[in-house]
Image (tube, grey):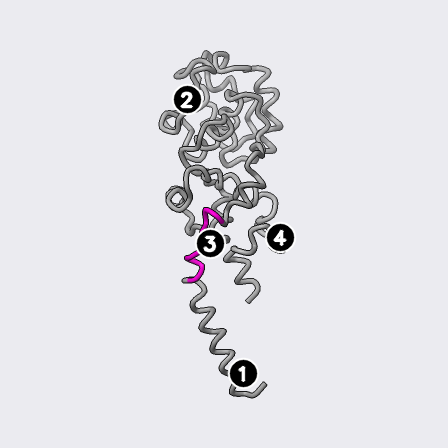
Amino acid sequence: MTPILSIRLHRILENFLDLYPIMRAKIDWPVAIRPLLRKYKSKRHPLDYQNVYQLLVMVVLSARSTDDFVNAVAPKLFAAFPDMSSLAGVQPEALFPYIAGITNFAHKAKWLTAIAAEIKTDEQIPRSLEKLIQLPGIGRKSANVILREAGVPPEGVIVDVHVLRVAPRLGIAKGTDPKKVEEHLMKILPPKEWDAGMAMSFLGREICTPKPKCDSCLMNKVCLYYSRLKK
């Protein structure tokens, strides 16, 4: 190869790399995300719940705690408080012996007893995002998880710590504000594909970890992070 040809090829490559972010904007994410949805669509959340009451309690407890630890303490908690009505008549301190190792356990005990005092029975657990986020200790992420696992059509996109890592890596969203990331995902994906949030969460737990296994990721063909690794 002549020096002149080499220089021309180098310039072409530079121009391509400069244009790459613009080219990526043309990715059809509703189509590109489908392999991820197919893989994880029917996968249950890692919290080991048996009913919606247990799900709600465990989701509240899991904030800033690991799912594995919540799964470990849950059986004794639910043996003592098997349903919402049994939780409705107790003071927060009654929960302390069962959840003392969980982050912010005292606040979570207050939230759970307040929720139980308000809704009283399992049958009255809300099945809408609007009503769930009015309950103490339940934000949009928690409400979206509850709705998904309860089999209710999604009203939002789950954005947890894993999604906040995976979405910018893929290039489907950017930033660290869960609300803004969710709003963006809801704009670019149709409601039928809003389970992409939980799918990205599973990907973040299994493949797109802090030290990602990019070569084995089914999304590497459209992944911004992976494309930069190959430069």
- Answer whether residue 55 is magenta in the image: no
Report how far apart the C-alphas of labels 4 and 3 lie in the structure. 17 Å
**Nearer the N terminus, badge 4 or badge 2?**
2
Q: Nearer the viewer, mark 3 or mark 1?
A: 1
Crowdedness near tag 1: few (<14), some (14–19) or many (≥20) residues, C-alpha within 10 Å: few
Q: Residue at x 50, y 83 (%)?
A: 7
Q: Which mark is residue 6?
A: 1
Q: Which mark is residue 213?
A: 4
Q: Which residue is mark 3?
A: 171
Indicate the amino acid at tag 1: Ser
Q: Which residue is mark 2?
A: 126
Callout 4 touching callout 3 (CB < 8 Å): no
Position of residue 214 measured from the top left corner of the image (x, y, whole percent): 60, 54
Indicate the amino acid at tag 2: Pro
Q: Quadrant of the C terminus?
A: bottom right
Q: Residue at x 37, y 44 (%)?
A: 187
Indicate the amino acid at tag 4: Lys
Report how far apart the C-alphas of labels 3 and 1 lie in the structure. 32 Å
Callout 4 touching callout 2 (CB < 8 Å): no
Q: Relative to 145, is 50 on the left or the right?
A: right
Q: Residue at x 53, y 84 (%)?
A: 5
**Nearer the N terminus, badge 2 or badge 1?**
1
Report how far apart the C-alphas of labels 4 and 1 lie in the structure. 34 Å
